[in-house]
Image (cartoon, grey):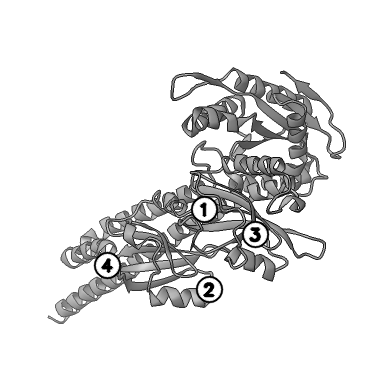
């Protein structure tokens, strides 16, 4: 009898321990999924703003703060500058709907909105967040504001950079306007459980995006004390908590994470009824039949493998361009650093190409963005067909691409560049109205040696060769020497 009771107590204790351990593990698994998902979304958002910041820097390199005047004394010059700004805006996704510049007093001097709306030239932006932050911080770089209602009545955010004079005072500002569907575009790509939720809020607690969507709540300030305390604490690491949402009255386990230096926060939640459902089943099985613990172990192992695969896929998504399936800028920087380390250690050959589709804006303007997207996809396929598995291919801007060719000397690099240029020239894409569209390509080529210290230096070097190819008439390959002072050769095929 004693041994029978002891055996029963042992079985009961084992079952209770198994139930408790299962609950703890399930909760940790949910926390892990929440952490991975929130990290993915923050990296997506950060990477997108980094890509558009590259376009801002490009604009600043072509404009002078002396030209930022309102009213402008030379309407023809103002029109040319506005046209240039418009061309840069059109290299970005559709949720970038406005571009403009302001003078040192934050008076708008040039502006373009898509779709076109009333002119806002002469608007005094001195009380806007972007102006205040640039003026208060002489070392401000990229400034992204919380959401606000623009002069056109739309809710959006502003991404800007400031021109600086000799005293580091603001000499002018260039900025993009980004609509709120920017945020929903990213979070809608993430798969959730039945009652799961992903939301993005700004530092003012305004709801910018949510899935499942509650349209009447978008652009409205959310009243959640836990999130407000987190924002007020200036904390940047992940915080998890249980909370009943006032929007749908669902009790969930949430994870809240700040998007690095940006004024945005990603909230990911899994409903208790979703993640506890499997635990209920496991507990019932433990109490009914001890022998099924072996099966449960197998299920948990499979679940663990699934999580590892999901984490791997999430990392891949964070480094991949969604349209072309090439690496994005972040993914390229990571891979290029490894190749540059090999050059430094073993002094191997490494070639780098900078590629730009000639007059790509004309394709978009003439045939539409859908045809432009097909042209970019066809272009990337042509490039992939000409490259090896070890070569690194990335999209770092709207129509700007870069290729690294390890163990490739200058002669081989010339052959590959010419092969790509010719293949792109022969490529035909059909427009929406079934008209053939052709492309040409400008390519800058440089050889990387141990004297190159960083990936940024690599890109700067080959960009000079690409710029030369553009200046000399496009549809050609230009080589630049490693000391950045001489173009070794250029091949014009117009």
x then y, percent, for residue 315: 50, 50
**Mark 4 crowd level (few <14, some 14–19, many ≥20, 10 Å Cα):** some
- Contact (CB < 8 A) between labels 3 and 1? no
- Contact (CB < 8 A) between labels 2 and 3? no
Give above or below for 404 relative to 129.
above
In 3D space, how far apart are the residues under numbered discs 3 and 4 (Cα atoms)?
46 Å
As drawn, the label of residue 421 is none
In 3D space, how far apart are the residues under numbered discs 4 and 1 (Cα atoms)?
31 Å
**Residue nearer the viewer, 321 or 287:** 321
x then y, percent, for residue 174: 65, 54
Mark 2, residue position:
235
Residue ID at (17%, 75%): 8
x then y, percent, for residue 370: 47, 32
x then y, percent, for residue 211: 35, 56
Question: Of marks 1 and 2, which one's residue comes earlier in the chain?
Answer: 1
Instruction: Kindly indicate the quadrant of the structure image that contains residue 123.
Output: bottom right
Mark 3, residue position:
107
Give above or below for 181 relative to 203.
above
- Contact (CB < 8 A) between labels 1 and 2? no
In 3D space, how far apart are the residues under numbered discs 2 and 3 (Cα atoms)?
35 Å
Which label lies toward us, 4 or 1?
Answer: 1
**Rendered-image quadrant of the C terminus:** top right
Residue ID at (51%, 48%): 97
Horizontally, is 491 left or right of 188 in the view?
Answer: right
Q: Secondary structure at mark 2?
A: loop
Q: Secondary structure at mark 4?
A: loop
Which label lies toward us, 2 or 3?
Answer: 3
Mark 1, residue position:
178
Q: Secondary structure at mark 1?
A: strand
Which label lies toward us, 1 or 2?
Answer: 1
Mark 4, residue position:
250
């Amino acid at each position: 009898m004693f041994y029978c009771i002891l055996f029963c107590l042992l079985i009961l204790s084992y079952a209770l321990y198994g139930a408790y351990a299962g609950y703890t593990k399930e909760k940790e698994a949910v926390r892990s999924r929440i952490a991975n998902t929130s990290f993915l979304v923050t990296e997506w958002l950060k990477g997108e703003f980094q890509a558009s910041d590259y376009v801002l820097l490009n604009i600043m390199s072509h404009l002078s703060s002396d030209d930022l005047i309102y009213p402008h004394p030379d309407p023809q010059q103002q029109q040319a500058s506005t046209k240039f700004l418009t061309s840069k805006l059109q290299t970005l996704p559709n949720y970038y709907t406005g571009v403009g510049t302001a003078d040192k007093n934050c008076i708008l001097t040039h502006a373009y909105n898509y779709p076109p709306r009333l002119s806002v030239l002469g608007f005094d932006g001195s009380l806007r967040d972007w102006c205040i932050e640039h003026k208060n911080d002489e070392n401000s770089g990229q400034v992204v504001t919380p959401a606000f209602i623009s002069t056109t009545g739309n809710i959006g955010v502003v991404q800007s950079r400031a021109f600086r004079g000799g005293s580091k005072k603001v000499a002018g500002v260039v900025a993009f306007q980004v609509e709120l569907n920017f945020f929903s575009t990213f979070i809608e790509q993430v798969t959730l459980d039945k009652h799961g939720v992903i939301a993005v809020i700004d530092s003012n607690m305004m709801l910018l995006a949510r899935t499942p969507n509650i349209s009447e709540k978008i652009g409205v300030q959310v009243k959640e004390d836990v999130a407000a305390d987190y924002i007020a604490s200036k904390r940047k690491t992940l915080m998890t908590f249980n909370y009943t949402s006032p929007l749908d009255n669902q009790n969930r386990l949430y994870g809240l994470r700040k998007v690095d230096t940006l004024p945005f926060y990603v909230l990911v939640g899994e409903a208790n009824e979703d993640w506890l459902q499997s635990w209920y089943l496991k507990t019932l099985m433990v109490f009914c039949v001890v022998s099924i613990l072996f099966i449960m172990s197998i299920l948990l192992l499979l679940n663990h493998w699934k999580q590892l695969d999901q984490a791997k896929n999430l990392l891949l998504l964070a480094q991949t361009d969604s349209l072309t399936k090439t690496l994005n800028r972040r993914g390229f920087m990571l891979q290029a650093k490894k190749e540059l380390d090999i050059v430094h250690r073993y002094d191997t050959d490494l070639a780098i190409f900078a590629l730009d589709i000639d007059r790509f804006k004309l394709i978009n303007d003439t045939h539409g963005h859908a045809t432009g997207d097909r042209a970019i996809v066809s272009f990337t396929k042509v490039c992939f067909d000409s490259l090896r598995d070890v070569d690194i291919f990335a999209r770092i801007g709207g129509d700007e691409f870069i290729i690294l060719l390890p163990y490739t000397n200058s002669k081989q690099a010339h052959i590959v560049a010419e092969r790509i240029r010719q293949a792109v020239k022969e490529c035909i894409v059909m427009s929406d109205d079934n008209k053939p569209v052709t492309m040409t390509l400008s390519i800058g080529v440089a050889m990387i040696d141990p004297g190159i210290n960083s990936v940024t230096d690599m890109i700067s070097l080959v960009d000079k060769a690409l710029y030369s190819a553009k200046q000399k008439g496009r549809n050609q390959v230009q080589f630049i020497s490693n000391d950045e002072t001489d173009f070794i050769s250029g091949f014009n095929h117009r």
